């Protein structure tokens, strides 16, 4: 064994699940501790200061206030490689949904306080106008998606980095790992809820139950469809959607469904999309990616429109026009 | 006002889930006030507004990665109430098993990752990794039980972290017969592990009994979910008692606001909670293992009852010292293990209805009250119908650590107020963190957010300027 590399875990605004996954990875693969020396991880190691220099830093959680921002920038300066772990860090995750509302409204409703009042004596408490994912704040070398991530993914990535290899990229969709069998699709009305009548051996989409499997990255072994719940996109979008500007989660799903129905995906997808949007509130497509830099940078993304609508953007524009 | 004489110390806590600061205010070198600060929020209660209530059991587990299963169950219960359905017995058993599994998991992981490193180790950089070099067996046996607890959540809830199966009306799909059989075998195999771990853990705790007894209780009220005189780790009434066990409040879940009051402050993202007719912080309520095991008469399972009897012989019928949390956690883990064994033997677990189809809302409000590993957990949903779908109009969540926040302050105050900073400065961090850690505070829950401090640094400030920095 060559020399150990150093590892830091920097938790920002997350749920702690990702940190637990690191624990699980170490419990299942103790050899991680032969490859890495943990120099910073507040949940597990007491008395740790941000290390002067570190080989690999794992970020967890969204950047939600100025305290987080400062830590995220500071750690980047000291780390050779940065991994963003989990959906919050990588794609803004569930907390990213709060971008749908204005921070003023949120603080007023939850704390009965204005933006200026909140944390007036403590700079690090001051909230950002909207949560940010880590790639939006600092350059990131690797992304491990899923909410929560799979321990084996953490192990493989850390091992590859240690041995100087490039980690693999996931290219398939959840459907590739799903045991449910497809049937000819003849759906009149889409539903969003599992009922007693649902057959758990047959593909949910074939039965008219909306499932994000075809647009979600693989790697989880289709754990939710196996448990009786359609995929809701916790691994984030597939590589194709991330890479191409014109692809988006709802449109891609509409295209896949159109193809399953025997329609022309490129020509007829809009018809399917309209049907989907009737039963599926736009935020549900972006439960883990609403505030993601990848979605925001797409010129025609529904995510951006959703956020603007939620924040009453049009209304404000009108008001300004009046004055 | 003599601002020159006033100082404020911020203690960044480590070895807890999430980030908490403890603020110590001093005047002329005497400690005057101690407060608990949560440093960020992810605004769950707000952004759920307008989303389908069916999505709540999927979204709310993200509040906390450790006790995600309890949030999952509490949300599903609230949604049941909105739809006005009574779920089938089998679904209830499955949800119970999810909650029992996560309590077992969280208790043991706290002991090996935070509790024992704090109690047993000395010096700097205390951690589970260091504990492993001293006491490998304790950690290894503990890790097996941690996995067992999570396996229960995985089998019954579909996933170990952020489970998915529970939904309004029951559960989406029950575990298969093979899964149940394998889990039953796993439980049987872990009987010995459990015995070994409990013996080791209790011995370790007995070896530091003096330390445990040195931290006094500073609280008046204690709360838990009960059914009569028995605790219930899934559903029941909210009961609040005083130090002698007299009932102060006993309310149905839907009436929780008749017992609890929430506060907001500009220096913390936590919303502390007190008894409704008292003020912050004196009216604080302590919840979690120590409250639960004191409020009940007995568990109803033999092994846990035997341990409870020993506990009471040692510390009295009502024992409230904060560091007794650790022993209470060991006892409860045993109870959860026994309950899981009991559940898997029940014939309803293996067959029967598990889901009732839900249509349209029957009640405007639904409240899910359950026990999370760290204490009572309340999800309060006000719903409305929009475009033929039932969506969230208002959402309120009360988490165990939000309730405990003021209780931690009271215990710290009892210990620190009036002391001269010079006398305790050396050990301040250690003392404060021992009390804080015993509560196993989960800041992810408390502020519906988590974030951790950069280091263990004590900053002493005068008029907003840093005058001294102590690095521990």
Image: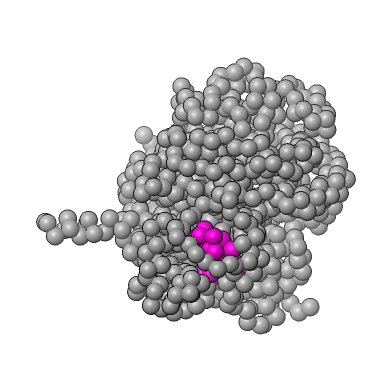
B324 to B356, vertically: above or below: above
Where is residue A31? Give x, y as percent.
Answer: 77, 69
Near-viewer residue (B384 or B300): B384
| Residue located 44% across and 75% down the image | A263
Q: Nearer the viewer, residue B204 or A279?
A: A279
The magenta segment = A203-219
Front in this rendered view, residue A238 or B229: A238
Q: Residue at x 78, y 54 (%)?
A: B178
Residue B359 place in picture, x, y as percent:
47, 42
- Magenta segment includes A211: yes
- Percent of width and height locating residue A279: 41, 56
Quarter of the figure with the N terminus of chain B: top left
Figure quadrant of residue A183: bottom right
Residue B325 seen in the current view: yes
Q: Residue at 63% across / 57% down in the picture?
A: A200
Question: Where is B376 relative to B452, above or below?
Answer: above
- Left or right of B430: which side holds B184? right
- Residue depicted at x 56% and y 74%: A142
Q: From the viewer's perspective, is residue A276 above or below residue A170? A: above
Q: Quadrant of residue B414?
A: top right
Q: Position of residue B349 (x, y in %)?
A: 73, 41
Magenta part mainly helix, strand or loop? loop
Left or right, B129 with reference to B191? left
Looking at the rendering, which quadrant does residue B159 occupy?
bottom right
For residue B446, side relative to residue A263 (left or right) = right
Q: Taking the image as drawn, is residue B212 in sight?
A: no
* Camera-side residue of A108 and B338: B338
Q: Residue furthest left?
A: A323
Q: Residue furthest bottom?
A: A165
């Amino acid at each position: 064994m060559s020399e150990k590399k150093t590892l830091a875990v920097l938790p920002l605004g997350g749920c702690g699940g990702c940190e637990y996954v690191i624990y699980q990875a170490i419990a299942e693969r103790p050899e991680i501790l032969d490859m890495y020396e943990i120099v910073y991880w507040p949940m597990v190691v007491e008395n740790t200061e941000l290390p002067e220099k570190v080989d690999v830093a794992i970020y967890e959680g969204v950047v939600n206030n100025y305290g987080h921002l400062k830590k995220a920038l500071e750690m980047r300066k000291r780390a050779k490689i940065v991994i963003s772990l989990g959906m919050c860090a990588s794609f803004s995750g569930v907390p990213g949904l709060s971008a749908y509302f204005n921070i003023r409204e949120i603080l007023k409703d939850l704390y009965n306080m204005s933006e200026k009042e909140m944390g007036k004596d403590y700079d690090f408490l001051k909230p950002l106008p909207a949560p940010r994912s880590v790639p939006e704040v600092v350059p990131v070398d690797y992304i491990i998606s899923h909410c929560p991530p799979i321990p084996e993914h953490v192990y493989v990535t850390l091992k590859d980095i240690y041995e100087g290899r490039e980690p693999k990229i996931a290219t398939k969709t959840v459907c590739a790992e799903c045991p449910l069998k497809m049937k000819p699709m003849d759906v009149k009305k889409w539903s969003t809820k599992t009922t007693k009548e649902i057959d758990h051996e047959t593909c949910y989409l074939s039965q008219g139950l909306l499932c994000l499997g075809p647009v979600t990255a693989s790697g989880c072994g289709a754990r939710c469809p196996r448990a009786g719940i359609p995929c809701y996109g916790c691994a984030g979008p597939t590589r194709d959607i991330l890479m191409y500007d014109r692809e988006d989660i709802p449109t891609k799903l509409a295209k896949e469904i159109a193809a399953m129905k025997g329609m022309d995906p490129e020509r007829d997808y809009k018809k399917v999309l309209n049907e989907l949007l009737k039963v599926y509130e736009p935020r549900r497509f972006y439960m883990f990616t609403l505030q993601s830099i990848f979605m925001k940078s797409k010129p025609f993304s529904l995510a951006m429109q959703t956020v603007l609508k939620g924040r009453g953007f049009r209304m404000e524009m009108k008001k300004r026009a009046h004055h | 006002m003599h601002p020159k004489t006033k100082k404020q110390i911020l203690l960044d806590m480590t070895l807890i889930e999430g980030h908490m600061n403890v603020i110590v205010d001093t005047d002329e070198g005497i400690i005057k006030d101690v407060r608990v600060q949560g440093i960020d929020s992810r605004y769950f209660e707000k952004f759920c507004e307008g989303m389908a209530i069916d999505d709540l059991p999927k979204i709310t587990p993200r509040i906390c990665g450790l006790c995600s299963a309890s949030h999952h169950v509490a949300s599903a219960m609230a949604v049941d109430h909105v739809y006005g359905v009574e779920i089938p017995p089998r679904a209830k058993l499955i949800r119970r098993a999810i909650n029992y599994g996560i309590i077992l998991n969280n208790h043991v992981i706290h002991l090996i990752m935070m509790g024992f490193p704090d109690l047993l180790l000395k010096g700097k950089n205390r951690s589970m990794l260091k504990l492993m070099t001293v006491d490998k067996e304790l950690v290894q046996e503990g890790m097996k039980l941690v996995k067992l607890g999570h396996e229960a959540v995985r089998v019954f809830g579909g996933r170990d972290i952020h489970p998915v199966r529970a939904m309004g009306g029951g559960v989406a799909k029950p575990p298969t017969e093979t899964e149940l059989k394998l889990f039953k075998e796993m439980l049987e195999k872990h009987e010995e592990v459990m015995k070994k771990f409990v013996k080791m853990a209790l011995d370790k705790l007995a070896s530091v009994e003096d330390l445990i007894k040195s931290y006094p209780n500073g609280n008046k009220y204690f709360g838990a979910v009960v059914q009569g005189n028995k605790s219930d780790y899934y559903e029941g009434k909210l009961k609040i008692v005083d130090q002698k066990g007299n009932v102060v409040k006993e309310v149905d879940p839907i009436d929780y606001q008749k017992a609890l009051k929430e506060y907001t402050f500009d220096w913390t993202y936590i919303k502390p909670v007190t008894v409704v007719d008292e003020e912050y912080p004196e009216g604080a309520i302590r919840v979690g293992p120590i409250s639960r095991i004191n409020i009940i008469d007995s568990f109803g399972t033999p092994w846990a009852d035997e341990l409870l009897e020993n506990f009471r012989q040692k510390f009295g019928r009502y024992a409230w010292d904060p560091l007794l949390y650790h022993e209470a956690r060991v006892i409860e883990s045993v109870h959860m293990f026994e309950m899981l064994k009991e559940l898997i033997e029940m014939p309803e677990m293996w067959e029967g209805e598990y889901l009732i189809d839900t249509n349209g809302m029957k009640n405007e409000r639904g409240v899910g009250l359950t026990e999370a590993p760290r204490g009572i957990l309340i999800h309060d949903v006000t719903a409305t119908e929009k475009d033929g779908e039932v969506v969230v109009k208002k959402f309120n969540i009360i988490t165990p650590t939000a309730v405990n926040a003021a209780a931690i302050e009271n215990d710290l105050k009892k210990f620190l107020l009036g002391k001269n900073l010079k006398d305790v400065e050396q050990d301040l961090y250690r003392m404060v963190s021992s009390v804080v850690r015993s509560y196993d505070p989960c800041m992810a829950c408390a502020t519906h957010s988590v974030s951790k401090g950069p280091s263990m640094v004590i900053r002493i400030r005068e008029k907003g300027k840093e005058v001294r920095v102590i690095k521990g």
